[in-house]
Image (tube, rainbow, N blue to C red):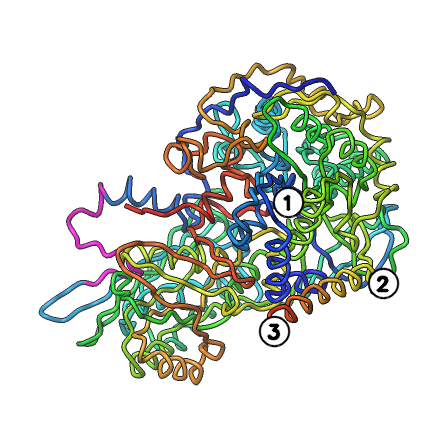
Amino acid sequence: MKYLDEYRNPEKVKALLREIASITTQNWVIMEICGGQTHAFLHHGLDAMLPPQIELVHGPGCPVCVTPLEQIDKAIAIASRPDVIFTSYGDMLRVPGSTQDLFSVRAKGGDVRVVYSPLDAVGLAEANPDKEVVFFAIGFETTAPANAMAVLQAKNKNIKNFSVITSHVRVPPAMEAILGSKSNRVQAFLAAGHVCAVMGFHEYPSIAEKYHVPIVVTGFEPIDLLNGMVSAIKQLEAGESIAENQYQRAVKFGGNESAQNTIRSVFQSVDRKWRGIGVIPQSGWGLSPDFADFDAEIKFDVGDILTQESPLCIAGEILQGLKKPTGCPAFGKECTPQTPLGAPMVSAEGACAAYYKYHREVTHE
Amino acid sequence: MCLAIPGKLTDIYEKDNLRMAKIDFGGIAREICLEYTPEAKVGDYALVHVGFAISLMDEEEAQETLRLLQEIADIGDELNEM
Amino acid sequence: MNEFDFEGYTCPVPIRPTETVILGHGSGGTLSRDLLRRLFLPDLGTAAPRSLDDSAVVEMNGARFALTTDSHVVSPLFFPGGDIGRLAICGTVNDLAMVGARPIALTCGFVLEEGLPFETLQRVVASMQDAAKEAGVYIAAGDTKVVQKGGADKLFINTSGMGAIADGVNISGANAKEGDVVIASGTIGDHGIAVLSAREDLGFETALESDVAPLNHLIEAMLAAGEIHVLRDPTRGGLATSLVEISEQSNVTIEIEEEKLPYKPAVKAACEMLGFDPLFVANEGKLVAFVKGDDAEMVLSAMKRAKYGEDAAIIGRVIGTGKSQVRLKTAIGGTRLVDMLPGEMLPRIC
């Protein structure tokens, strides 16, 4: 496939690995923000090909992992209603709420459906006027424009039986939260290319400067990831810290303004709790008051659901790059993709699931 | 996060007041929304996430990246030969 | 932003295995295996020898027979390249053939939902006849039940079958040996993606067709060409799940090479779009064979000459014993583990 296959060329991968080995003189800790990038590193076996001085830590950029337990419990409560068709991106169905997941709701008779696009959920609402169609609008900046358009379209077409549970999160506040933490170890970021396709990277130069940390916008193919590494390591070795773009074919400095405008018209900035991490101020988007009619939390009056997370897993430390999945005592034992203790073990993009799938030394019974 | 892949626009049309397109990912086609890339033309490649084109692929930049890579690869080969 | 303190954050409560059956229990992956091991085998399987191969091998008066059963619940009933009828015949024929048996006779049980049009049923039965003829098996017995509207989804078919195993043929997932060459009989993932594309909910279009086909004649050609140790049809759970099962049954380390795996471009594209791993996608007319190293080229060329083996390719080999593991050499030169499908395959969107 054009724009993918060229960036998986083994010869060029080798050349970039040689380049990385030749410019690296000391130990560096680099975080890839995005779960898709974590997945790509492990899927291609690329992490193990880096020089030993480079420690890759995996960031919180897995929207499924960081969606707070309360929102999942609300989703489960709404999805269990007989009058509701509950729609969601596929990854969310397996994520554990307090007592069950959306799959279990479906097993008990709930109408829970996977959609590829939020516009498909709007279409379902039109096709099923006697039902309430609810869409679980999660995701980072990449997904927000699509979810915003679905709400806007429902409003424009006066579709009354469509609503959303929102749980949008944004990358820059999370980066600052990680960098501002006492326990931070991250020395450079590979920034999430598809988030930047929407938002651009105009927010990054000031963060790079303030925390003296190189930030390199990076794509998702092996060569993209290695190109990003080369830029980050060059900066680290030279003591520089600027925001750079290594995903020029898809990302412009200002991003996609049309998408940003729609986001601003539908959503407003809110404090958002990140599962496993905690509340990060102004780190998310919620529906703005103009769109309250489409807010499923108001429509179904789910109110505040009290949840309690047990301290059994270390997702928080993993999501901010303090520990590796293999450093968790429960990894591969109590906690597996079948019996997840935490969301990072559930989502295909979760660091724990990626490690379980690609990295675990298997000792089958 | 945010699985997005490039595909080629093969048809552009209006539907429900939205600018839509048919996009081909190489043997698999789907309808996507073009509202965020209104400048897109048939034949362009768009980066698609959850049924929306979020940016258009920049062929010149892509070539430039590959050219720079080739330089790195060539330098590596020269070093190997030395 | 102020100093941000990450200490004291906790993580979700453990969710123990569900109280109810969920779809993932039927996915052919680890959830299916758990169900088998924890519930069915302790209660139902204790009296008989258990190989966990595609068919059981039963001995009678010195002769060996293969016995198997399979239920088919595919939706939609008709999909590009096939339908539930062809699937029901081929699935059972292939399960028999995967232990080296010559399929002889099948039985079929129909569960029909009230309101199913006769025209639909006729089309399915005609397709079953064609497939049975192609495979060279006959339908020896049958049964029909009708359930109330909503009691089943249109039409379910169970097929059971028996086959005869010739002397000297000894094929089992437990027989893989160091040095064996791993051969795939053709492109991977066609069936799973074709069926998915026929469902409206994901809204994608493709000319891709299911590969559903009876493989017994292909296997006859292979058996004549060289020493075969293992045969398996990577249906639900895909190639990855089959390989992991074989590595466990034989206690061997298998290494496959990403670059050698045959895929149709549309399957690759669909997997990129949905975030699927093609190694997990179902096949219905493909097999994976573990062949004695010296015989591999002979078997491969016999496959390429046979119907349904034209695109056969060597994809890897058994590189060690004593450790059950499947490794993948990635196209860019890395190495990673291959695991079974954990549950139902879900489009990865974020």
* Mark 3–mark 1 distance (CA, rounded to whole Å): 45 Å
Crowding near the residue tagged with mark 1, few <14, some 14–19, many ≥20 C-alpha atoms within 10 Å = many
Q: Please state if B39 lies on the left or on the right of A293 as rendered.
A: right
What span is in magenta?
A: C42-57
- Disc 3, disc 1: CB below 8 Å? no
Q: Residue B71's image quarter? A: bottom right
Chain letter of disc 3 in the image: B
Task: Tell me the chief SS of the magenta region.
Answer: loop
The residue depicted at 51 percent of the width and 24 percent of the height is C11
Q: Indicate the position of residue A57 as horizontal and vertical percent values.
A: 57, 39
Pointer 2 or 3: first along the chain: 2
Q: Residue A22's image quarter? A: bottom right
The residue depicted at 40 percent of the width and 29 percent of the height is C16
* Mark 2–mark 3 distance (CA, rounded to whole Å): 46 Å
Report which residue position mark 1 lands on. Answer: C349
Q: Is residue A290 above or below residue A94?
A: above
Report which residue position mark 2 lands on. Answer: B42
Can you say which quadrant of the picture contains the N terminus of chain B? top right
**Toward the viewer: A329 or C60?**
A329
State yes or no: residue C262 in magenta.
no
Crowding near the residue tagged with mark 2, few <14, some 14–19, many ≥20 C-alpha atoms within 10 Å = few
Q: Is residue A11 above or below residue C134?
A: above
Of badges 2 and 3, nearer the viewer stands: 3
Q: Secondary structure at mark 1?
A: loop
Report which residue position mark 3 lands on. Answer: B81
